[in-house]
Structure formats: structure tokens, C-alpha cells
Image (spheres, helix red, strand yellow):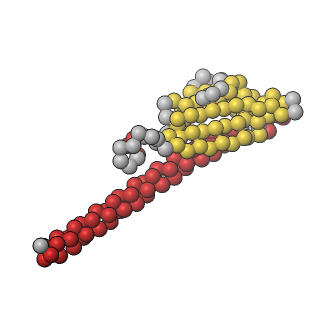
């Protein structure tokens, strides 16, 4: 009986060690994918903020700022609308003289896009407050989790051109 345990016990221990090593390796791979997903989502949120900041440089008059859309007149006489369409951020520019429209879509994986005008010292259109939230999809995530990963970006932009007018 003692000889039988000397043959079986080492094989069981080796088997348990192999299982432990594989489980640790799987957890490390899941963690790596999670970090990659979070980094991608945060980059998309930051990119959205930078894009809106570039468009906001030319704001002359804000016509409408709501939860998920911003409409304004730019310095060239165009009406520009920035809005959330499903998970995309769309920028639609309409030339008011020729009535032609140009639209650009940015795949930011949006779950929320929020615009708010903040008044400062009696100036009603002084600061544009932007909040972007991006969210992962099940295809991006490791395993079969039910929760989603999210990333956020916020920025307050002083609308110098609108304040001067």
C-alpha cells in the first residue's frame, strides 16, 4: 500500500501544479485584454474631447446645447451640428448660403455625449462644458462577463469668439 501512494501522490501533485500554472496564465491574459480595452476606450473618449475642442475654436453663436447635441454658427457662416448617433459622434456642417450639407462620423463607441452652456459674469455663452462616456461591447471583452467597461472624459472650453460677439 505504501508503494502505491509513492507512485500516485507525486503525479497528483504535478497535476495540481499544472492546473495552477494554467489558471494563473489565463488570469494574466484576461487582465492584459482588460487593460487593452480600457486603454482603447479612454483614447476614444480623449479623442472625442480633442475633436470637439477643435470644432469649438470657430464657434460664433451657440444655437442649441442639449444632452446629446450641440448646434452653432461658425465664423464662415455655416451651421454645425455635433450629435450622438447610436455609438458614433457625427459632425454635420450645413452651408447656409448654398444649403449643401457635409457629414463626418467618428467611431468613438459612445454611450453618452453631453453638452452644457455655463454662464460666467453675466455672459450666457461663456463656457461650453463637455462630457463624453465610452463603453465596451461584449465582443471586445475577455470571457463572458455581463458588465461593460467604461471610460470618461470632461472638458470646459471658454468660447472666446462667442463671448466677444
Badge count: 0
Q: Is residue 26 left or right of residue 155?
A: left
Q: Residue at x 40, y 55 (%)?
A: 30
Q: Residue at x 39, y 43 (%)?
A: 145
**Res 114 quadrant in image:** top right
> Observer-nearest residue: 12 or 23?
12
The x and y percentages for residue 149 are: 49, 44
Quarter holding the C terminus? Answer: top right
Residue at the far front: name it: 1
In the displayed structure, would residue 27 be above or below residue 21? above
Q: Is residue 35 left or right of residue 8?
A: right
Q: Residue at x 41, y 39 (%)?
A: 146
The x and y percentages for residue 87 are: 49, 34
Q: Is residue 107 in sight in this rendering?
A: no
In the displayed structure, would residue 65 be above or below residue 19? above
> Observer-nearest residue: 82 or 10?
10
Q: Is residue 25 left or right of residue 60?
A: left
Q: Residue at x 25, y 69 (%)?
A: 13
Quarter holding the N terminus? Answer: bottom left
Q: Is residue 107 left or right of residue 156?
A: left
The x and y percentages for residue 161 are: 79, 36
**Res 22 quadrant in image:** bottom left
Amino acid at each position: 500500500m505504501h508503494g502505491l501512494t509513492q507512485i500516485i501522490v507525486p503525479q497528483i501533485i504535478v497535476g495540481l501544479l499544472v492546473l495552477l500554472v494554467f489558471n494563473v496564465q489565463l488570469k494574466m491574459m484576461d487582465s492584459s485584454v482588460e487593460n487593452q480595452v480600457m486603454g482603447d476606450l479612454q483614447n476614444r473618449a480623449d479623442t472625442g474631447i480633442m475633436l470637439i475642442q477643435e470644432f469649438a475654436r470657430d464657434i460664433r453663436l451657440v444655437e442649441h446645447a442639449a444632452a446629446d447635441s450641440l448646434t452653432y454658427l461658425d465664423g464662415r457662416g455655416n451651421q454645425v451640428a455635433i450629435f450622438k448617433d447610436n455609438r458614433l459622434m457625427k459632425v454635420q456642417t450645413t452651408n447656409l448660403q448654398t444649403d449643401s450639407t457635409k457629414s463626418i462620423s467618428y467611431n468613438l463607441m459612445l454611450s453618452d455625449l453631453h453638452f452644457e452652456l455655463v454662464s460666467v459674469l453675466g455672459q450666457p455663452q461663456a463656457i461650453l462644458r463637455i462630457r463624453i462616456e465610452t463603453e465596451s461591447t461584449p465582443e471586445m471583452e475577455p470571457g463572458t462577463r455581463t458588465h461593460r467597461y467604461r471610460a470618461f472624459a470632461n472638458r470646459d472650453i471658454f468660447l472666446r469668439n462667442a463671448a466677444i460677439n
